[in-house]
Image (tube, rainbow, N blue to C red):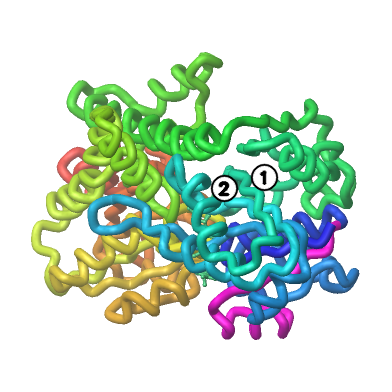
Amino acid sequence: MDLCVIGCGYVGLVTGACLAEAGHDVICTDVDSARIAQLNAGQVPIYEHHLDDVLKSARAAGKISYTDDAGDAIRRSEAIFICVGTPPKENGQADLSAIDNVARQIATEALSPKLVIEKSTVPARTGLELRRALNAYSRNSAVTFRVVSNPEFLREGTAVEDFLHPDRIVVGVEDETSAAQMREIYRPILEQKFSCPVHNGACPATADVPLLVTTINSAELIKHASNSFLALKISYANVLADLCEKIGADVNEVTNAMGLDPRIGGQFLQAGLGFGGFCFPKDLQAFVHLAGTVGVDFDILKAAERVNKQRIDRFLEKVHQALWVIKGKRVALLGLAFKANTDDTRFSPALEVAQRLVNEGADVHATDPEAVSRAKAVLPQVTYHEDVYDTLRDAEAALICTDWDEFRNIDWQKAGSLMARRLVIDGRGLCDLQRMRELDFEYFSFGREQLRAHATAR
Ligand SMILES: NC(=O)c1ccc[n+]([C@@H]2O[C@H](COP(=O)([O-])OP(=O)(O)OC[C@H]3O[C@@H](n4cnc5c(N)ncnc54)[C@H](O)[C@@H]3O)[C@@H](O)[C@H]2O)c1
C-alpha cells in the first residue's frame, strides 16, 4: 500500500522505516527541509539502534523516499500517518497546532479519499476534532476522510524492535473499513513476515501480536493511561527509595523482590533521578489536564509529577552535602540523554542538573555516548568530552545522570586514580556498593546505604 508519513522525527522515521521494511511504499515528509535534505543524502538525523540499517535497506529496495513537498506526498498515498510533535503548553495542555496544520494541508491537497492515521500522542477526543477539521478545511466535497487513532508504544533505544515485535497494536476506528485497512497495513507485522534487522532472521518465537480495535476515544486514552501509569510506577519507586534511606533498607532489594510478583512486574521500578524525555512528562501533564477539563481530579498523577520534579532537588541536595561549596569546583557529569541508548535530551533530568550546576558556578565537564552534540546546542557553558576518563580527570565529584552501560562498566579503580576526590553521586544506582566501599569512594545514591567520608578509612 502507498503510505505517507508526516513528521520525520523519532516516531515518524521508525514508522516509515519499519512499514517500508514490511513491504509498503512509503513517502516521508517534514516541514524541516534541512532534515529532508539530510535524509536524501543518506544521513539519519537521530540515533536509534538499527534505524540506519533499516532505512538503508528500504531505500536500496526503493520502498522509502523523502520529500519536502507535502502536497505531493499526500496526493500519492492512500493512508497518511501523522507523526508530528505534540509538545506541552505552559498549562500542561498538549499543543495540537502541528496536528491542525497537517489537517489543513491534507484537506487542501488531497484529490482522493484518505485514511488519516493519528500516530502522534494526543488527548482523547482529538481524533474527532481532526475529522471535523479535515472536513472543514476540505474544498473538494468528493474527497472523503476516515480518521484512525493508532497510538505508538515504541521506546526510544529499542524503537525498531518495539515496532516490529509489538506487544499489541491498538487501532481506534469509526467504521469496519478503516479497521480492515489498518489490519492490511499491519499484516506483515501481525504475521511477523518481514526480514528482521534486529534478530537477523532468527526472531524469538512469540505469541501472536494482538490487534485491538477500539473506538477512537479509547485508543487515545490507552496511550495516555499507559504512559501515566508507568510514570506513576517510577515515582512510587522514588518515594520508596527516600523511605529506604531513612529506614536503613536497600531499595534495590525491595523493588527486586516486589518485581518478582507478576501482578507488579520489575520494570519501571528503578529509583533515581526520575523520568524525562519527550513522552512521560508531557503525557502525564496532558492527561491530568484532560481529566481536569471534564471534572475528574487525577490527584494521584499530580503527586507522581510532583515527586518527579523533586528528584532533581534531592540529587542536588546530595551534591551540596558532599561538596559543600559548588562554585569553582570541577564536576564530571556522566550522561546527558534522558535515558540510555538514545541521543534524545528533551526534558532530560541530566540537562537540568547540568544547567543548575552551571548557574551555581561549577566547572561542569560532561560526556554521553550519543547526546553530546544535542546538549552542546542548549548548554554551551559546559566542557564536553568524548572519553569518560577524560571527563573524570581532576574532577572533585562524578555525577551519574543517565543509565548507559558505558557508565555501569566504568573501571572505578582507574577513575579514582584520575579524580581529584573519590566521590560519586549516582543518580541512576549503577555502581556496586561493595566495590565502591573497597575502592574507598564516598558514594551517594538513592535508597541505598550512603558511603560517607568519615565512614571510610581515608
Ligand atoms: N519519541 C518517542 O519515544 C515517542 C513514542 C511514542 C509516541 N510519541 C509521540 O509521537 C509524536 C512525535 O514524537 P517524536 O519524538 O517523533 O517528535 P520529533 O520532534 O522527534 O518529530 C516531530 C517531527 O515533526 C515535524 N513537524 C512538525 N510540524 C510539522 C508539520 N506541520 N508538517 C510536517 N512535519 C512537521 C518536525 O519537524 C519533526 O521532525 C509526539 O506526539 C510524541 O508524543 C513519541
Mark 1 sits near ligand 1, with its Cβ under 8 Å away: no
Membership of 222 in magenta stretch: no
In the picture, which quadrant includes the N terminus? bottom right
Mark earlier in primary sequence (1, 2): 2
Residue 342 location, x and y as percent?
A: 54, 59
Q: Secondary structure at mark 2?
A: loop
Q: Amino acid at mark 1?
A: Asp
Q: Few, some or many C-alpha atoms within 10 Å of disc 1 (few <14, some 14-19, many ≥20)?
A: some
Q: Is residue 454 above or below residue 140?
A: above
Labelled pair 1, 2 in contact (Cβ < 8 Å) = yes
Q: Is residue 178 left or right of residue 107?
A: right
Membership of 35 in magenta stretch: yes
Residue 24 location, x and y as percent?
A: 84, 58
The residue at the point 81 percent across, 54 percent down is: 197
Mark 2 sits near ligand 1, with its Cβ under 8 Å away: yes
- Range drawn in magenta: 24-43
Q: Which mark is residue 443?
A: none
Q: Which mark is residue 162?
A: 1
- Mark 2 lies on residue: 155
The residue at the point 23 percent across, 23 percent down is: 248
Q: Amino acid at mark 2?
A: Arg
Q: Is residue 19 left or right of residue 403?
A: right
Q: Is residue 307 above or below residue 240?
A: below
Q: Is residue 97 above or below residue 160?
A: below
Q: Few, some or many C-alpha atoms within 10 Å of disc 2 (few <14, some 14-19, many ≥20)?
A: some
Q: Specify whether residue 447 is in view.
A: no
